[in-house]
């Protein structure tokens, strides 16, 4: 185990970041990056929840079942293709190999 005194850590940090202001800038940058990661994780989970909810709402209407009439594939992000049913408006995302 390595133990350091506070002044040793501060000396190294000031040497690496240039000054106390540089150290504060780096701290702010890291905090902003952490906040961005947290926000992205939240938005991804929200998007996933919306997809599941939308799919559940469609399956609840069992008496209104029909054959889907899919539209032409629309290009999506990174090898994804999305299609929309002309009758009910359901959308799907498919991976294209």
Image (spheres, rainbow, N blue to C red):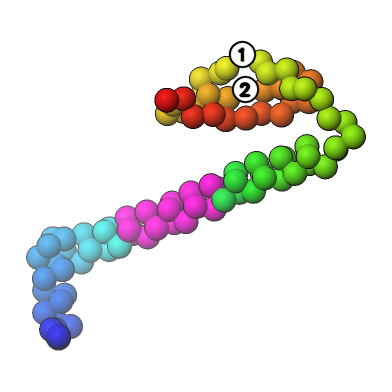
Return the residue nearer the eye: 66 or 92. Answer: 66
Residue at x 75% of width, y 44% of height: 56
Tag 1, which secondary structure? loop
Residue 36 position within the rendered picture, expressed as x and y whole percent measured from the top left: 43, 51
Q: Is residue 72 left or right of residue 17?
A: right
Query: CB under 8 Å between callouts 1 and 2?
Result: yes
Q: What residue range appears in magenta?
A: 28-44
Return the residue nearer the eye: 66 or 71. Answer: 66
Q: Main secondary structure of the magenta part?
A: helix
Q: How many marks?
A: 2
Residue 53 position within the rendered picture, expressed as x and y whole percent measured from the top left: 71, 45
Is 62 rendered above or below residue 90? below
Residue at x 57% of width, y 17% of height: 73
Is 83 rendered above or below residue 5? above
Return the residue nearer the eye: 22 or 51. Answer: 51
Residue at x 57% of width, y 51% of height: 45
Q: Earlier in the sequence, mark 1 or mark 2?
A: 1
| Quadrant of image for the N terminus | bottom left
Task: Based on the picture, tell me whether residue 9 belongs to the magenta stretch.
Answer: no
Q: Report which residue position mark 2 lands on.
A: 83
Task: Based on the picture, tell me whether residue 38 belongs to the magenta stretch.
Answer: yes
Tag 2, which secondary structure? strand
Is 49 rendered above or below residue 6? above
* Whole-number angstrom distance, CA of label 1 to CA of label 2: 7 Å
Counting other residues with Cα less than 10 Å from the Cα at mark 2, is it few (<14), some (14-19), or many (20 or more)? some
Q: Is residue 73 left or right of residue 3?
A: right
Residue at x 42% of width, y 25% of height: 97
Q: Report which residue position mark 1 lands on.
A: 72
Residue 32 position within the rendered picture, expressed as x and y whole percent measured from the top left: 39, 55
């Amino acid at each position: 185990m390595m133990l350091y005194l506070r002044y040793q850590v501060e000396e190294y940090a000031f040497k690496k970041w240039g000054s106390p202001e540089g150290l504060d800038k780096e701290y702010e940058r890291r905090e902003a990056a952490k906040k961005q990661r947290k926000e992205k994780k939240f938005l991804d989970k929200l998007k996933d929840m919306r997809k599941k909810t939308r799919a559940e709402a469609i399956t609840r209407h069992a008496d209104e079942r029909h054959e889907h009439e899919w539209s032409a594939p629309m290009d999506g992000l990174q090898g994804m293709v999305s299609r929309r049913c002309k009758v009910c408006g359901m959308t799907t995302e498919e991976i294209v190999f």
